Amino acid sequence: MPTLTDLARNYTTLSAADVEWLHSLVSDWQLLADLSFADLILWVPMRVPAGAAGSGWVAVAQMRPTTGPTSFPDDVVGTQIGQGRRPLLDTARTERRIWRESDPDWTSGVPVRAEAIPVTRNGDVIAVIERSTNLNSARTPSRLELTYLQGADDLARMVAEGTFPYPGHDTTLVRSPRVGDGLLRLDSAGRVTYASPNAQSAYRRLGLAADLIGADLGAATAQLGAAGEPVDESLMLVARGRAPKETEIDGNGAVVQLRSIPLVVAGQRTGALVLVRDVTELRRRERELLTKEATIREIHHRVKNNLQTVAALLRLQARRLQAPEARAALEEAVRRVGSIAIVHETLSHAPEEIVDFDDIADRVAMMAGEVSSPETRVTPKITGQFGMLPASVATPLAMVLTELLQNALQHGFGALGPRACADGIIEVLAARAPEQLTVTVSDSGAGIPPGFDLENTSSLGLQIVRTLVVGELGGRLSIAPRPGGGTVAVVDLPVRYEPGPR
């Protein structure tokens, strides 16, 4: 489905500022749809063709209500209509007023009443909202519904006057309260004229014993905060309906989210709508998640410390051994434990079980270069990006990279002279695709011996690499001669996309 921006760019003459205004409106017009019990379609005048007398319309956005039945089961975004096909749109645009003079339309078998609301910016009508109400379940409205409709009428007039969405105010509200969560209607003095049952219940949980009707919401809300705490200025602005903001109040073991929508019609402040949502359980779960994350990070920190202790003990033991093979085996074990410790150290600082493996790869390469023998001192070079990886992939991949680098240093350059090693190279190339990670480790060393068979190799390091890559990570491993001399090891791993840290 094409986006609002695409449709505006391809079919209209709207400026970038006009399109941004429409984005702000669309990001917050669920409120208008719910208060109206109606579907909303945003129509924009199309670019006038050469020689044409007028323009048609293109639908660039659509919203269905959560408080009532829809009038449009199918999506209409992208629909184009010619000039004169929808007189209500033309009238609302030319006369710059909300058009309501229509009889119910029975074309679809369901009675639908259509209205048109001009969308004004800087005095110009840049679009028209078609508001369609399904009358199939029409009945005598309750007081709640009458309050909703009154609020919808005020918001519609503000859209037509160019005062909603609020200029300069960020309306990208993802987790804001909705109309059904709880609604308070305030008069121009900030007193409550209507409180929905959900809103009343939310304030009861905060500890309010009195009825909200007739109360000064700002004063009543300020009394519910924690004792001895200073009153938050933003809380007072929201509770009195003075500013289009959001805030939360914590009291009596409950947490309630408030959002204020000031109503200014014809330049006169008529009051405000305050949306109320009880988020006590949501905040409790968020606190539990934060506690769990902190616990997991502490566990990773302790595992890292324990692994470093094990590595130190193995290093001490290796120094006491006289047999070269035993000492070399313990030194290899120290490197393997160290590579795992690096991953756990990174995870101890990560808010989730996802790490930036580029940092780990740099440290693994540095460790491999530092612990190599002086005669084979070659510094590995890393290019490309590994990206974000889950811990289940990062830990075995760190060991795989350690073993491949150590194999290149020990077997690729161990048999060469110091001069050859001085000119030697070890390159690690990481290529990340959406569902694939390819790691290539190449060196200019002695190369693989004749008759080398990866399946039947006696090298413990390569056996570990093959087991981790193929058995644990479900990837592919290949080792072949490098053109010009040396060895190339290629690791292909299936990995899912992981977003960066928040």
Image (cartoon, helix red, strand yellow):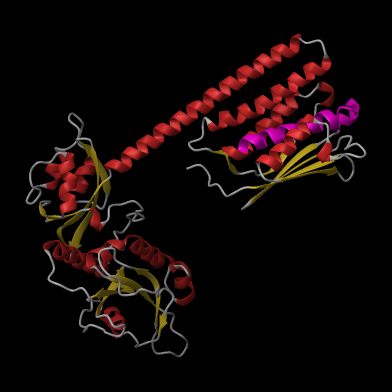
Percent coordinates x, y for residue 292 in the rendering? 42, 33
The correct choice, above or below, for 121 with respect to 411 in the image is below
Q: Quadrant of residue 369?
A: top right
In this view, the residue farthest toward the right is: 450
Q: Main secondary structure of the magenta part?
A: helix
Say which residue appears at 89% left-offset and 34% top-offset.
446
Say which residue appears at 37% left-offset and 87% top-offset.
83
- Residue 443 horizontal side relative to residue 429, left or right: right
Badge count: 0
Percent coordinates x, y for residue 80 in the rendering? 42, 81
The answer to whether residue 34 is visible is: yes
Percent coordinates x, y for residue 460 in the rendering? 78, 30
Q: Quadrant of residue 113?
A: bottom left
- Residue 310 horizontal side relative to residue 158, left or right: right
The answer to whether residue 356 is visible is: no
**Along the line of sight, which residue is nearer the eye, 112 or 257?**
112
**Along the line of sight, which residue is nearer the eye, 200 or 187?**
200
**Along the line of sight, which residue is nearer the eye, 265 or 89?**
89
Q: Is residue 417 magenta?
A: yes
Say which residue appears at 29% left-offset and 66% top-offset.
65
Q: Is residue 32 magenta?
A: no
Percent coordinates x, y for residue 217 in the rendering? 13, 47
Q: Quadrant of residue 481?
A: top right
- Residue 286 horizontal side relative to residue 445, left or right: left
The correct choice, above or below, for 415 with respect to 44 in the image is above
The residue segment tinted magenta is: 394-422
The correct choice, above or below, for 277 with respect to 447 in the image is below
